[in-house]
Image (cartoon, rainbow, N blue to C red):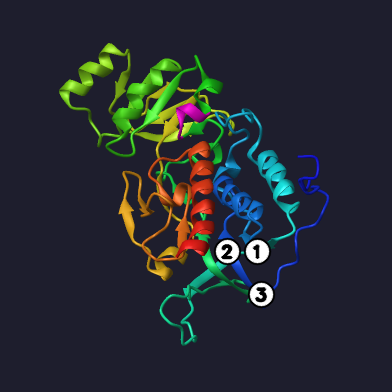
Amino acid sequence: MSDATPIPSATQPASAPDSEKLYDAIIIGAGFSGLSAAMQLARARKQICIIDAGLPRNRFAAASHGFFGLDGKSPDEISRLAMAQIRAYPTVSIVHGMAKAASRLESDAAGTGNEDNNRFKVSLDDGRRFQARRLILATGVVDTLPDIPGLMPRWGKTVLHCPYCHGYEVRDRALGVLATGPMSNHQAMMIPDWGPTTFFTQGKYEPEPEIRAQMDARGITIEQSPIVELIGAAPDLEAVKLADGRSTPIQALFAGPTVSMTNPLSEMLGCAFEEGLAGPFIKVDASQETSIPGVFAAGDAATARHNATLASAAGVLAGVGAHQSLIFS
């Protein structure tokens, strides 16, 4: 239609944050899931406040791969582009800071029992407070790796967690899989599609005879002596040193981290959790609503399967779910 309102210009500033305002929704976290949720609500012309501490999980990676249309772009570049687009909508406020507490406010309205009396308060570490009728937790997770010298300086570069995200970039090199849990057998079986693979059991996660036979068929070398150190000028990797004194040439090492929540907000609110193979995650329904009415969650904090595209899709569901709950609840 020729008289349709144009998409707002990215040069327009977002609204100034207002601690006295009751927002329709507060979104905590401005990663793939948080900004995807924000876009749905902004386009529904809802008053929203995005709170972000600037510490995304993917900040250790130089590039994001497998995300439709943005393959190979850095996480920072994707974030800056998405943030510029969301800033264009006049109902959006953006707050830079660390959310440290969240709670439901008791309604003081007499009511008839039919009103939506959900009210939530979010407090930041600098003392600022914001209120909204809905919360979306897009807070992500924190990765914890085994305490092996040299792992963390290479995290996201040559120590990797996801072959679909980073396997192509290390293809045909000498690859290793560091056993960190029962699912490491599964990961080790996959990695030969990207290059010659050694599975380091760390002396704790030995494959059963049937799995060992499958690994043999895939050409996987099984090493029982634990890795005690990574060798090379980080972030490059040349080899791994083993507990028995030997070293094995390895140029990229896949390791599944354990994960935990980045902050205690979901616990403070009373959200139910499910237990995943790598750690707990927030339980949500088909619309990404948690066990607490009015609180939604999306992204890595609310699933056992961590992937940028899945996080973005979950953010869309959370944004739509939050919007519709403002209408139909």
The Cα atoms of the two marked residues, 1 and 3, are separated by 9 Å
Residue assigned mark 3: 21
Quarter of the figure that contains the N terminus:
top right
Q: Quadrant of residue 47?
A: bottom right
Q: Is residue 264 visible?
A: no
Evaluate if marks 1 and 3 touch, with contact meaning CB atoms under 8 Å apart.
yes
Residue 28 as seen in the image, left or right of residue 189: right
The Cα atoms of the two marked residues, 2 and 1, are separated by 7 Å
The Cα atoms of the two marked residues, 3 and 2, are separated by 11 Å
Q: Amino acid at mark 1?
A: Gln
Residue at the extreme right of the image, as rendered? 11
Q: Is residue 53 above or below residue 155?
A: below
Magenta span covers which residues?
Answer: 161-165
Q: Which mark is residue 47?
A: 1
Q: Amino acid at mark 2?
A: Ala
Residue assigned mark 2: 25
Q: Nearer the viewer, residue 293 or 258?
A: 293
Q: Position of residue 258 (x, y in %)?
A: 38, 46
163 within the magenta span: yes
Q: Is residue 213 above or below residue 90?
A: above
